[in-house]
Image (spheres, helix red, strand yellow):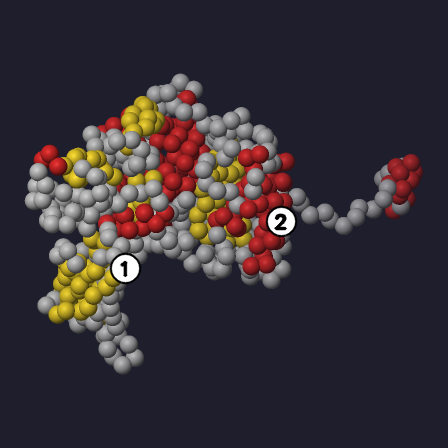
């Protein structure tokens, strides 16, 4: 009104202005991806950035993360994150760095972006080891791997269900996520080679030497981020897709996810991880980045990747997905879970030819929770996110080049040897043709009835017949025959025949060879007992035990005995009722 009285505005303008409603309270700015916004502000301060994120998908993924995290909240699991990556381009389509439900108490770290945060990997690295062994020709896809009690100095891996299968095909061991076979496979490859492979694939968080991680590297002894894991799984799928499309292998297929449209060279995203790692070993990181950028050798071959994804397609889905195969709209996903030691981190990553979905759940402060696992805490969110994506066009096609049909032993999964009686044809990488032939078939001499083994000490050549027999080492056989009723143990020697020791009849399960055993003292200051254990082929065998030159006792059926050993070197000797003897040297280290 004062403006009109002063003649600054006319009466009509004044009348219109008075009739306009007053503005309401200030509306908060939309925040669909607050963790992504914070990340870009750190990486590109003050710049206008155009991301690859799909707004509609981002909103739906964020809602799913919040709803799943609300369920996990009942178990005091306060954080969850998810990432969706397009395989062909590496573009990030959804970036949910954490739950966006308001943290009123401010104690649960929901402002922390968990996508670039390094966390213990659990079992999520096992597919890379399997693919690396296939690429290098170290083993065939379904070769038997020992699954028996295994101990190393300061490290005793166990399967999640604390059972043993004796021996399992490598592909089944991956699909079932068995820990002991994974450690055995890492022994085949060795930690140095595997660590170098991880660096070539794009991981920058493994910035210590191989001796620092040891064999625990495959079970969560190192850390990785959801960002790099999604990038590597997408790179594997990209390699397979491009090779199947007739393209040549290019190192450029391996790169981290692409977050902004300005990133014309996807490999440049690898370098951006330095700000997210947070480590004092700058020289080591520079070394790793040099390996990633300059490596021209084949990281993983397309046949190895395809066989790895075939194994991951067999992974059992969570209870919420029961009967998925009967619904045509459900995508066929190659997927893997992981759970870190102490139930601190739950991982689930799934791959189709078009998309990679990566999920993490846990607590940002590292607190573990009973029941936190990849299968129960992360996998349901993974499959819900996949339902938001366009239907998959199909599974991964088998590569035409680099694979060959070869005869493998039906019992062992190794290349068929001359003694293998049952064989089957199997697609394997061409590099696998240089892997070992079956070591578990031998030729044995039987009497004419086939009921007893014989040799020249008790039978004439005309009284013997030769048979090929599938024979596992005693420790593997001990557990394998419990789960495989069709396994046929070797017949005993005919009375009067001497054992030619061609096949060992018993084997130490504990202690390991040349072990240093730490034995604590009890409340009275006395050193506690050692429990050596032996596996014997005969169920009714009797074993007599000696420690050094002192008789300890005998065992039958279950060959485990208790003995007291002083500090220093000792020799355990075990002799069965047929005179077969084995011994094991070990050193006792007592507590102060």
Crowding near the residue tagged with mark 1, few <14, some 14–19, many ≥20 C-alpha atoms within 10 Å: few
Mark 1: secondary structure: loop
Q: Considering depth in this image, is 127 or 436 the residue closer to the camera?
A: 436
Does the image show residue 409?
Answer: yes
Residue name at image x 46 percent, y 52 percent:
345
Residue that label 2 marks: 67
- Name the residue at 63% across, 36% down: 56
Identify the mark nearer the N-term, 1 or 2: 2
Residue 36 appears at what percent x and percent y? 54, 43
From the top left corner, tell me how far across and down residue 370 is, in percent.
49, 60
Q: Is residue 508 above or below residue 419?
A: below
Residue at 79% x, 48% y is 24
Residue at the image point whose x is 12% and y is 57% from the top: 579
CB of mark 1 within 8 Å of CB of mark 2?
no
Query: Which is more toward the observer, 381 or 463?
Result: 463
Whole-percent x and y of residue 54? 59, 34
Secondary element at tag 2: helix
**Looking at the picture, does residue 109 appear above or below residue 488?**
below
Q: Quadrant of residue 103?
A: bottom right
The spot of residue 146 in percent (x, y) is 29, 46
Disc 1: which residue: 557
């Amino acid at each position: 009104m004062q403006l009109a009285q002063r003649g600054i505005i006319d009466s009509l303008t004044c009348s219109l202005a008075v009739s306009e409603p007053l503005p309401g309270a200030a509306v908060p700015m939309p925040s669909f991806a607050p963790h992504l916004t914070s990340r870009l502000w750190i990486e590109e301060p003050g710049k206008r950035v155009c991301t690859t994120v799909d707004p509609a998908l981002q909103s739906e993924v964020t809602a799913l993360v919040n709803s799943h995290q609300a369920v996990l909240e009942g178990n005091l699991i306060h954080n969850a994150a998810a990432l969706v990556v397009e395989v062909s381009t590496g573009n990030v389509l959804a970036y949910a760095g954490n739950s966006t439900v308001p943290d009123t108490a401010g104690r649960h770290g929901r402002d922390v972006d968990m996508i670039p945060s390094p966390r213990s990997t659990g079992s999520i690295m096992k597919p890379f080891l399997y693919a690396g062994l296939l690429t290098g020709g170290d083993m065939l896809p379904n070769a038997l791997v020992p699954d028996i009690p295994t101990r190393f100095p300061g490290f005793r891996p166990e399967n999640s269900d604390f059972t043993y299968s004796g021996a399992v095909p490598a592909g089944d061991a991956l699909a079932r996520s068995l820990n002991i076979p994974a450690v055995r496979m890492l022994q085949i490859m060795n930690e140095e080679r595997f660590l170098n492979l991880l660096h070539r694939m794009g991981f920058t968080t493994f910035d210590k030497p191989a001796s620092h991680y040891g064999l625990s590297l495959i079970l969560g002894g190192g850390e990785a981020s959801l960002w790099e894991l999604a990038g590597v799984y997408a790179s594997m799928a990209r390699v397979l897709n491009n090779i199947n499309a007739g393209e040549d292998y290019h190192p450029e297929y391996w790169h981290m996810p692409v977050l902004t449209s300005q990133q014309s060279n996807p490999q440049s995203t690898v370098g951006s991880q330095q700000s997210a790692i947070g480590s004092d070993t700058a020289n080591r990181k520079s070394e790793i980045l040099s390996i990633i950028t300059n490596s021209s050798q084949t990281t993983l071959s397309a046949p190895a990747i395809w066989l790895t994804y075939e194994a991951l397609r067999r992974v059992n889905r969570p209870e919420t997905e029961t009967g998925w195969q009967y619904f045509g709209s459900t995508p066929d996903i190659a997927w893997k879970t992981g759970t870190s030691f102490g139930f601190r981190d739950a991982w689930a990553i799934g791959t189709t030819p078009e998309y990679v979905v990566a999920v993490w759940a846990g607590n940002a402060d590292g607190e573990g929770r009973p029941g936190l696992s990849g299968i129960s805490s992360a996998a349901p969110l993974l499959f819900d996110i996949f339902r938001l994506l366009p239907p998959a066009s199909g599974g991964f096609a088998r590569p035409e080049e680099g694979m060959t049909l070869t005869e493998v032993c039906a019992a062992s999964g190794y290349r068929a040897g001359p003694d293998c009686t049952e064989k089957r044809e199997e697609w394997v990488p061409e590099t696998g043709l240089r892997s070992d032939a079956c070591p578990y078939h031998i030729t044995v001499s039987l009497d004419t009835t086939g009921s007893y083994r014989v040799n020249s000490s008790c039978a004439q050549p005309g009284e013997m017949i030769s048979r090929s027999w599938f024979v596992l080492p005693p420790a593997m056989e001990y557990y394998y025959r419990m789960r495989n009723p069709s396994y046929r143990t070797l017949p005993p020697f005919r009375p009067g025949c001497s054992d030619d020791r061609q096949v060992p009849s018993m084997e130490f399960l504990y202690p390991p060879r040349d072990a240093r055993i730490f034995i604590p003292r009890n409340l009275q200051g006395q050193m506690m007992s050692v429990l050596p254990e032996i596996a014997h082929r005969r169920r009714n065998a009797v074993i007599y035990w000696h420690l050094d030159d002192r008789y300890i006792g005998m065992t039958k059926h279950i060959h485990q005995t208790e003995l007291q050993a002083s500090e220093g070197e000792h020799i355990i000797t075990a002799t069965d009722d047929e005179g077969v003897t084995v011994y094991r040297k070990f050193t006792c280290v007592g507590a102060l």
